[in-house]
């Protein structure tokens, strides 16, 4: 249930400083630009030098985040995970990786947040904030009456379109062919997205990583399962 989930009333109210302490603006920077940071009841929201740009929805145990961290060192990546204990595990994992790499600054750019990504995405991210959204092995919800629980749908795709910038990419991978077809069908039908062609897809470094580095992907590998990949580009909005 969502009863214990907290979320900011707007993206500007979200305090990311504990997630990415190495990216928090210094007091000097805040003084130079007093507009950064807004006053809310319990004090000033501390601002980061840059915004979160990549979201891993239903990140599970964090394999993708950990693998992408050194590949996108200047980009802030966020895993969103609904299970409390799994979220805490990923947060501990990141803390340990940072401690093991004190001099390199590695793993400072990844964070994990407990959230129901189907409900509160626009509370966390402003319009066009994200450049990449990952859906790696989302729960399949096989039965037809459960399809409304799927993380890809016409309504949710409009939210993904809202937080994704034009040119941004949605990455999907699953071992369930029916879910693959479902995701392709829903993104293809959405006016804000176009499918990324196979040659471009296969040349994308993130695709290579996504295929092998998530915990679920490794499980599928061990069982010699198939993996279905599809990418979708966020199109420019048509002129009014
Ligand atoms: N992406 C990971 C991987 O590939 O190893 C985990 C895949 S696992 C099958 C699906 C994950 O999505 C689970 O950890 C589940 O708790 C999470 N999840 C399901 N619904 C969610 C939601 N609405 N918001 C955030 N996470 C969700």
Image: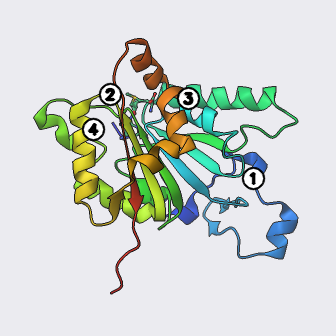
Q: Is mark 3 within 8 Å of ligand 1?
A: yes
On screen, 183 above or below 125? above
Check disc 3 and report its element: helix, strand or loop: helix
Q: Earlier in the sequence, mark 2 or mark 1?
A: 1
Check disc 2 and report its element: helix, strand or loop: loop
Q: Quadrant of residue 58?
A: top left
Residue at left offset 47%, top offset 42%: 202
On screen, 43 above or below 90? below
Percent x, y of residue 99: 79, 29
Residue at left offset 56%, top offset 45%: 78
Residue in the foreground of this view, choosing between 3 and 75:
75
Q: Earlier in the sequence, mark 1 or mark 3?
A: 1
Query: Residue 38: which numbered mark, if any?
Result: none
Residue 5 showing in the rendered view: no
Q: Mark 3 touching mark 2, by CB under 8 A?
A: no
C-alpha distance separating marks 1 and 4: 36 Å
Label 1 Cα crowd, 10 Å radius (few <14 / some 14-19 / many 20+): some
Query: Residue 23: which numbered mark, if any?
Result: 1
- Kindly give the residue lying farthest to the left in the view shown: 145
Residue 144 showing in the rendered view: yes
Check disc 1 and report its element: helix, strand or loop: helix
């Amino acid at each position: 249930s969502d009863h214990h989930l907290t979320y900011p009333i707007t993206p500007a109210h979200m305090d990311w400083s504990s997630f990415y302490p190495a990216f928090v603006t210094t007091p000097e920077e805040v003084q130079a630009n007093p507009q950064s940071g807004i006053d809310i009841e319990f004090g000033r929201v501390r601002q980061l030098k840059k915004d979160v740009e990549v979201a891993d929805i239903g990140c599970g145990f964090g394999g993708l985040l950990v693998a992408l961290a050194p590949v996108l060192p200047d980009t802030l990546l966020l895993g969103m995970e609904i299970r409390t204990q799994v979220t805490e595990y990923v947060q501990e994992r990141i803390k340990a990786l940072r401690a093991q790499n004190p001099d390199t600054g590695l793993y400072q750019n990844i964070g994990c947040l407990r959230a129901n990504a189907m409900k509160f995405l626009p509370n966390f991210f402003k319009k066009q904030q994200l450049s990449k959204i990952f859906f790696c092995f989302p729960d399949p919800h096989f039965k037809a009456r459960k399809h409304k629980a799927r993380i890809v749908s016409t309504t949710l795709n409009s939210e993904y379109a809202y937080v994704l910038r034009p040119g941004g990419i949605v990455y999907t991978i699953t071992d369930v062919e029916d879910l693959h077809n479902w995701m392709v069908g829903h993104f293809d039908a959405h006016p804000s997205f176009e499918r990324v062609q196979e040659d471009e897809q296969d040349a994308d470094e993130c695709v290579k990583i996504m295929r092998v580095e998530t915990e679920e992907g490794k499980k599928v590998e061990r069982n010699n399962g198939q993996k279905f990949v599809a990418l979708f580009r966020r199109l420019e909005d048509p002129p009014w």
